[in-house]
């Protein structure tokens, strides 16, 4: 799935990947529409009490980049799975040269944002969250790494302007 140039997808529930089928599913949310008002490419998941899942084989990932927004603030997110062989990756970054970090009041292009609730990161093999090049992740709940036995989770936050903010527990 590719969402670009100010496109928007609203969904009640999203599950990316399924290791029992083909695997390697990828979702990319990128860029903004030209002109004003600023329209960011967006994937918004809206059902309460559902989960947003990124779990499959090693190639399963979602990338939010270059001014785009991933909105999952109403439900928990699982990066990785419950069974052996289930993993996942979420990248929040700016690959476009010179984009400043995300600014909700910007009238010009700014960085990528994931507005999340709680995030659970763990898989076998290792599941991963990467925030880099001015990407921003705002978690309104907890962030847990390696939730299940023998599952591994990794978070990387790198580069100036990149931010991972957790309103709850980081464990």
Image: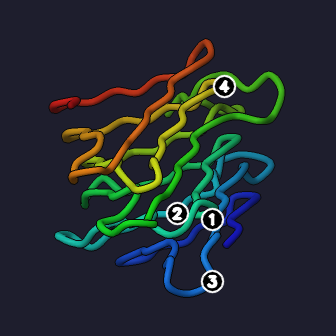
- In this view, the mark in front (3 or 2): 3
Q: Residue at 33% across / 58% down in the picture?
A: 78
Of the two numbered discs 2 and 4 on the same chain, state the one appearing first in sequence: 2
Measuring from the top left, give residue 72's x and y in whole percent: 36, 57
Mark 2: give few (<14), some (14-19) or many (20+) Cα within 10 Å.
many
Q: CA distance from mark 3 to mark 1?
A: 15 Å
- Quick one: quadrant of the C terminus? top left
* Residue 142 in picture, x, y percent from top left: 20, 39
Query: Mark 2 and mark 1: span between their CA atoms?
Result: 10 Å
The residue labelled by disc 1 is: 27
- Mark 3 or 1: in front is 3
- Work out how far the residue at label 1 is from the one at label 4, CA to CA, in angstroms: 19 Å
Q: Earlier in the sequence, mark 2 or mark 1?
A: 1
Estimate the x, y position of residue 159 in percent, counting from the top left. 62, 16
- Residue at coordinates 63% horizontally, 33% vertically from top-left? 111
- Please tell me how many numbered marks the rendered image carries: 4
Which is in the foreground here, disc 2 or disc 1? 1
Residue under pointer 3: 22
Residue placed most toward the observer, 42 or 143: 143
Q: Residue furthest top?
A: 160
From the image, which quarter does the N terminus lie in? bottom right
The residue closer to the viewer here, 160 or 104, is 160
State the CA–CA distance, disc 2 to disc 4: 20 Å
Q: Which of the marked residues, 3 or 2, is nearer the chain's N terminus?
A: 3
Mark 3 or 4, nearer chain start: 3
Cα gap from disc 3 to disc 2, whole angstroms: 23 Å
Please report the residue visible at 43 percent of the width from the left and 36 percent of the height from the top. 154
Residue wearing tag 2: 43
| Residue 138 located left or right of residue 43 | left
Q: Residues within 10 Å of mark 3 (few under 14, many from 20)?
A: few
- The residue lying at 46 percent from left, 23 percent from top is 163
SS class, disc 2: strand
């Amino acid at each position: 799935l590719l969402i670009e140039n100010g496109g928007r997808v609203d969904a009640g529930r999203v599950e990316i990947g399924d290791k029992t089928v083909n695997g390697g599913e990828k979702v990319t949310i990128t860029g903004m529409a030209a002109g004003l008002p600023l329209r960011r490419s967006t994937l918004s998941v809206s059902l309460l009490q559902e989960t947003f899942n990124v779990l499959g084989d090693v190639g399963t990932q979602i990338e939010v980049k270059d001014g785009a927004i991933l909105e999952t603030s109403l439900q928990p997110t699982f990066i990785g799975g419950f069974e052996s062989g289930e993993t996942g990756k979420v990248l929040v970054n700016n690959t476009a040269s010179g984009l400043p970090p995300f600014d909700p009041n910007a009238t010009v292009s700014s960085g990528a944002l994931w507005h999340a609730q709680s995030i659970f990161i763990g898989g076998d093999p290792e599941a991963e969250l990467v925030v880099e090049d001015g990407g921003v992740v705002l978690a309104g709940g907890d962030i847990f790494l390696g939730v299940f036995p023998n599952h591994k989770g990794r978070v990387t936050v790198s580069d100036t302007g990149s931010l991972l903010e957790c309103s709850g527990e980081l464990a």
